[in-house]
Image: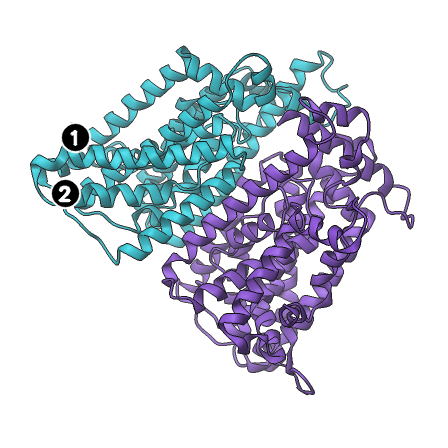
Chain colours: A cyan, B purple
Amino acid sequence: MSIALPARLKHLRRLDTTAIVFLALIVVLVLSAILVATVGRNLFSPGSIRDILTGMSVLGFVAIGQTLVILGGSLDLSVPYVVSLTSLIAAQTMSGETGMVLPGVLLALGVAAIIGLANGVIVTYLNVHGFVTTLGVGLMLKGYLDTNYQGTAGEAPWAFQLFGATGIGPVPVSTIVMLALAGLVAFLLARTSFGHHLFAVGGNAEVARLSGVRTRRPLIWAHVLCSVFAGIAGLLLASRLGVGSPTVGVQGGYDLLSIAAVVLGGTLLAGGRGSIWGTIGGVAIFAVLDNLMSVLQVNPFLKDVVRGAVIVVAVAIYSRRRLVARRERFTRSGEAAPVPADATSEGGSR
Amino acid sequence: MSAAERGLTDPSVTRPVETPAAAPAPGGLARLARAAISPRGAVYLLLLVLLVAVAILNPSFAEPGQLVRYIQRVAPIALVAIGQYFVIVSGEFDLSQGSLVTAQVVLAGTLIGQDDAKVIPVLLLLIVLGTVVGIVNGLVTTFLKVPSFIVTLGMMLVLYGGVMWWTGGAATGNPADSFREIGRGGVDGLPVIGLLPWAVLVLAAVVALAAWLSKRPFGRTLVAIGDNASAGVFAGASVWRTKTAAFVISSLCATVAGVLLVGYAGVHPSVGRGYEFIAITAVVLGGVVLGGGRGSVWGALAGAFALETLFTLLNFTSVPSTMRDAIQGAIIIAAVAYSGAAFRARRKRPTTGLGAVADAGAPGPSTQEPPGTSGPDPTGSTPSSDPAGTAAARGEQKKENRS
């Protein structure tokens, strides 16, 4: 819509990317509300809001972690298997007993942290590309899951299932926890040396190193946090399903969808630029679209088509905008820049 | 060993082992040994070891007929890996390959049916679809500046969802036997090997074409752009045209793989699933660097063969089939870590400390080995390829400085 109005676009350029994501979210919300109204339903009814927020929480947890890793210039494709594994560990440790909830949660998150640590150490010390590392680690986890589990296992006690089932008004507790953790991570990124170093390493590792940043540490922490967040998503799924499932992560497609949500939220896939709140906006856009398509009873396969198209179109609009913004920063004259866009983008990290 | 070496009846596969492009050491055997443990040669060594291991565990594997069947089985993965090579070496990703294979298989099954007359038109349609997918991937990546990871991820969702939606989720229909013959049949009644499958011939043709292309100015430009796009542009290369061509090649390779797969895997929505990651694994195993600018077609091909041989080996041992993935995961990490470490070690040899910086100034022995290309072509290709090749070498040093 907005690209049809060039004057409007000029205005948008000065906005922060996160603001644009939320602007896009509002546009999506309004359009969805109108479309939902045509079939005689209300998008803002408590039930519908609960559906949307519930849909946000699992992908939200995974995407927060994924944002950290992508900001650091890496990638995590192992998240779906971490999600499945933690759901199994938690459900099996608890095995229906309320007293075992805390040990189950701690054990699941501990295992997730160890997986993240392995990812981080392989990426930083063995210098293996994050894509290859996490693809490999993911495959190893998949092999372990397929070998040891034939189907669902364990049982989450009722007290633990409440975590996924209760809500304050129409807002589920899990979404509140997700947003609180997003706020915590946003604080980490904005106010702590970990956050600043992560941005620096993601923008240009060599410049960060020459500036005295220990380049390995923030990236390892980002990987650990990413896996822990995937673990929280696994716990939430275990609480919702009441059991642990070896396929729940893969069925959700959390690896690629979380990366898509992060990029949709305005974070550069190459790292060094982006924000948590943009990611949350991206996740919300996905959730609203999903809800819209469910209400309109769109064929589930057609949903994938729409999702794919939305991802590409949205990112195309952002990357055009960012491109223009960058060029301005370099040559005041604007169009005279002879350097191709790729070169500008490489030097563009402040 | 000789049996296994003979195993690659496709002479092209063994050739790079015998003629390592620019190993400086004199003496045939020492040169061969050094090339074999070098990051580029390691995959051939791995392949050889795996082939020997399979041949020992199952002696009938070394029979000519069995070997040809083995190549037939690897053909689809090898084709997809070769396509992926062109995209990865140019610095991009193609995640849409697996979905494209699925789409082509389902389309062929649904459209051809039992009507022999439709084989040629549908085949043309598949090729057109493959080309269009490649062009869209390439143009959106280059003109709209969307990361190819996202573009091809979107394409993957659109293709898979679209085909499933169109067929209602259950792909049915078996294409006519004349179509399946491409993947299943072959030239029968040959003296030593018996049946020479079409798949092997198709693979040989594609490999020859790909090897030829990678020696052409196009191939050189692709590597140069993958390494350092701005250097490539200064050398007169057109980034969008080259990268789009790479995406088209990748999609066409996936199309051919799909046509072969219809033959012996049949029509099913799960055919082709995960092929993009298998292809990327194979390519990376073959020494091609993610991010572009380094690697060769032969490496990618050997990577695909090594991966499939590994799976064959696991089938013969008592390892449960579900552990295949775990072993694949461990191998890919180890291979990339090894080649990275070996590459850095060689880079640092001439000087201590900031060796890479010194390299950039004075071309030492290590700079004589630009990655995928074996240096500027001495036989003299068109002038435009030469600056691109130099740019590739220069960009590579820049990359080393950064890491």
Say the numbered circle drawn on residue B197. Answer: none
Seen from the viewer's position, the closer of residues A160 and B157 is: A160
Give the residue type that dot 2 points to.
Answer: Ala
CA–CA distance in space, label 1 to label 2:
18 Å
Q: Name above or below for residue B147 compared with residue A211.
A: below
Residue, disc 1? A167
Picture residue at 66% right of the left edge, 53% below the top: B299
User: Where does the C terminus of chain A fall, quadrant-wise?
Assistant: top right
Residues marked 1 and 2, same chain: yes
Percent coordinates x, y for residue B261 in the rendering = 54, 69
Horizontally, is B396 left or right of B156 in the view? Answer: right
- Assess disc 2: are there few (<14), some (14-19) or many (≥20) residues with their C-alpha within 10 Å of its C-alpha: many
Percent coordinates x, y for residue B101 in the rendering = 54, 60
Q: Name above or below for residue A248 compared with residue B118.
A: above
Residue, disc 2? A156
Seen from the viewer's position, the closer of residues A255 and A54 is: A255
Picture residue at 83% right of the left edge, 35% below the top: B236
Mark before the other along the chain sequence, 1 or 2 = 2
Q: Name above or below for residue A230 compared with residue A196.
A: below
Residue A30 can be seen in this image: no
Percent coordinates x, y for residue B121 in the rendering = 65, 71
Seen from the viewer's position, the closer of residues B106 and B194 is: B194
* Residue B47 image-quadrant placement: bottom right
